[in-house]
Image: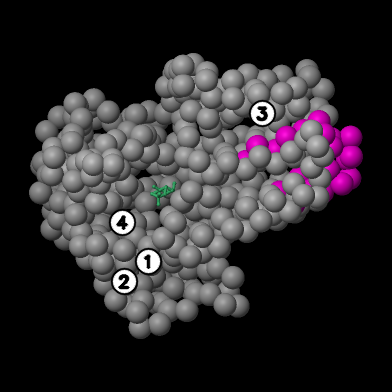
């Protein structure tokens, strides 16, 4: 096995570096670059000869695996193919409808969650899925390898690897926040205890900020479990790759389309998955408040909300998308004139358009209710060409690094968010330039490679 540096490395994540869709003839074709953690990690380990163990998430991924397409020079990809029913329970019911909600504090506790007996079956499936992934790691990992387990889908994997291959150095890294202990108590005790001890079997557990690491440690203490060592290491975007992307002909064409849409108006932008934690609806209400209390912006600003569909098999996500779309329509009906559409909401998954929009934005709104890091908050300042102002939630992990140069808001405070949008729109050019330069400096202060190095160091290698 080749190495990411000197040591053999195995990355393990639910979503892998390559994903596929089926074309009209039923043949697997690449689905474009994955966002989120898979996209960022891919750049870091491409060409290093590392192993990457991931799930074949769809029929197209499975077909691609069978056709030998799950392959790339300089990277060894090994997929697992759980039974559909097992995977749906592990991914939808446990990982996304429960663990994601717990870690992001998304439950409306008067009504949800309700852990009936079906939960136990779902948890068994989650355990079985984790075991499949752990078994695959044990098959491919050479002696002395470092295993970097990613995210909440795979919380039990460290303990499973430790019992089968105790000589491997396993690190677990969470890209989400970690639930505060009081919220973690929502989970059935047997599940939360297994989750924590599963992670605690790692040599170390990493998070994007100290705040999430401390929450994990507090959860362990609350459950009487000895916490492992923890570390905070925020991911950083690859500036070179972003610059190339923003300069590509496809992004240039997308930029022209955006220019036609926005014209000479100022542009408030958000770029997210269509996701409850991203707080799109309050973002629109903040814009409504802005237009009402600062009528000078009516007609001269466009709010472009790019929110590509996500996890559409979950009813919570479908309902949220409907609420986002209804709110945008309502506010457009309220404020639009013959020549001005105040909100442009686009749910297409179009990375070129997103990059082009990030270069053109005058204000970038990143207002999640809770977010492990939020890479958009770091990518925006690197590609933006208009000294765009960043309005950033204090609940995003990225606020730790960027607070000094962003306008920081409480994401629940719609009026304060409207004030920040106004402040961003009327800010003097020199101040905008200064803040934009500061943002770039803060983002660039951390080379992307540091994140991988921190994990290798935490593994003791
Ligand atoms: C977040 C998670 C990732 C996940 C991504 C996209 O960033 O931390 O683990 O891959 O969202 O979600 P999806 O469910 O589509 O993989």
Percent position of residue 395, x then y? 61, 50
Q: Which residue is under mark 3? A: 261
| Label 1–label 2 contact, CB within 8 A | yes
Between tags 1 and 4, which lies in front?
1
Q: Residues within 10 Å of mark 4 (few under 14, many from 20)?
A: many
The answer to whether marks 3 and 1 mark residues whose Cβ atoms lie closer than 8 Å is no
Quarter of the picture holding the N terminus:
top left
Q: Nearer the viewer, mark 3 or mark 2?
A: 3
Q: Earlier in the sequence, mark 4 or mark 2?
A: 2
Q: Which residue is at a point 24% across and 30% down the rendered structure image? A: 4
Find out whether the residues at labels 4 and 3 contact each other: C-beta distance under 8 Å: no
Instruction: Label 3, secondary structure: give it.
Output: helix
Look at the numbered disc 1 and give the secondary structure of its residue. Answer: helix
The foreground one among 264 and 289 is 264
Taking depth in this image into account, of 27 and 277 the one nearest to the observer is: 27
Mark 3 / mark 2, whichever is N-terminal: 2
Q: Which mark is residue 154?
A: 4
Mark 2 residue crowding within 10 angstroms, few (<14) / some (14–19) / many (20+)? some
Q: Is residue 385 above or below residue 29?
A: above
* Earlier residue among tags 1 and 2: 1
Disc marking residue 94: 1
Badge 4 element: helix
Residue linked to disc 2: 123
**Magenta highlight range:** 284-305
Image mark for residue 426: none
């Amino acid at each position: 096995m080749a190495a990411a540096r000197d040591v053999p490395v195995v990355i393990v994540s639910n979503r892998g570096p390559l994903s596929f869709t089926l074309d009209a003839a039923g043949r697997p074709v690449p689905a474009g670059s994955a966002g989120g953690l898979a996209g960022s990690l891919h750049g870091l380990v491409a060409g290093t000869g590392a192993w990457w163990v991931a799930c074949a998430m769809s029929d197209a991924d499975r077909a691609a695996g069978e056709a030998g397409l799950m392959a790339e020079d300089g990277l060894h990809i090994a997929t697992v193919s759980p039974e559909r029913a097992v995977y749906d329970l592990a991914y939808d019911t446990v990982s996304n409808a429960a663990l994601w909600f717990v870690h992001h504090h998304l439950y409306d506790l008067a009504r949800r969650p309700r852990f009936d007996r079906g939960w136990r079956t779902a948890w068994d499936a989650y355990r079985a899925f984790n075991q499949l992934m752990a078994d695959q790691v044990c098959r491919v990992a050479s002696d002395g390898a470092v295993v970097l387990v990613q995210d909440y889908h795979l919380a039990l994997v460290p303990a499973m690897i430790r019992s089968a291959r105790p000589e491997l150095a396993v690190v677990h890294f969470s890209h989400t926040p970690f639930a505060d202990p009081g919220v973690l108590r929502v989970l059935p005790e047997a599940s939360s205890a297994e989750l924590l001890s599963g992670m605690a079997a790692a040599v170390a557990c990493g998070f994007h900020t100290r705040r999430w690491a401390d929450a994990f440690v507090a959860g362990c203490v609350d459950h009487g479990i000895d916490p492992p060592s923890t570390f905070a290491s925020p991911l950083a975007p690859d500036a070179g790759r972003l610059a190339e992307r923003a300069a590509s002909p496809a992004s240039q064409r997308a930029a022209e389309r955006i220019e036609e849409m926005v014209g000479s108006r100022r542009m408030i932008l958000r770029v997210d998955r269509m996701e409850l934690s991203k707080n799109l609806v309050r973002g629109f209400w903040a814009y409504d408040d802005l237009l009402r209390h600062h009528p000078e912006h009516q007609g001269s600003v466009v709010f472009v909300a790019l929110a590509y569909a996500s996890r559409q098999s979950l009813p919570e996500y479908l309902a949220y998308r409907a609420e986002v779309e209804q709110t945008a329509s309502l506010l457009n009906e309220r404020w639009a004139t013959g020549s001005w559409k105040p909100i442009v909401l686009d749910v297409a998954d179009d990375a070129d358009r997103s990059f082009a929009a990030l270069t053109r934005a005058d204000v970038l709104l990143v207002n999640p209710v809770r977010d492990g890091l939020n890479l958009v908050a770091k990518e925006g300042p690197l590609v933006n060409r208009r000294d765009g102002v960043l309005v950033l939630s204090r609940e995003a992990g990225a606020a730790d690094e960027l607070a000094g140069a962003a306008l920081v808001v409480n994401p629940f405070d719609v009026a304060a968010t409207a004030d920040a949008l106004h402040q961003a729109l009327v800010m003097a050019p020199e101040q905008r330039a200064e803040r934009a330069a500061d943002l770039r400096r803060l983002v660039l202060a951390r080379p992307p490679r540091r994140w991988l190095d921190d994990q290798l160091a935490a593994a003791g290698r």
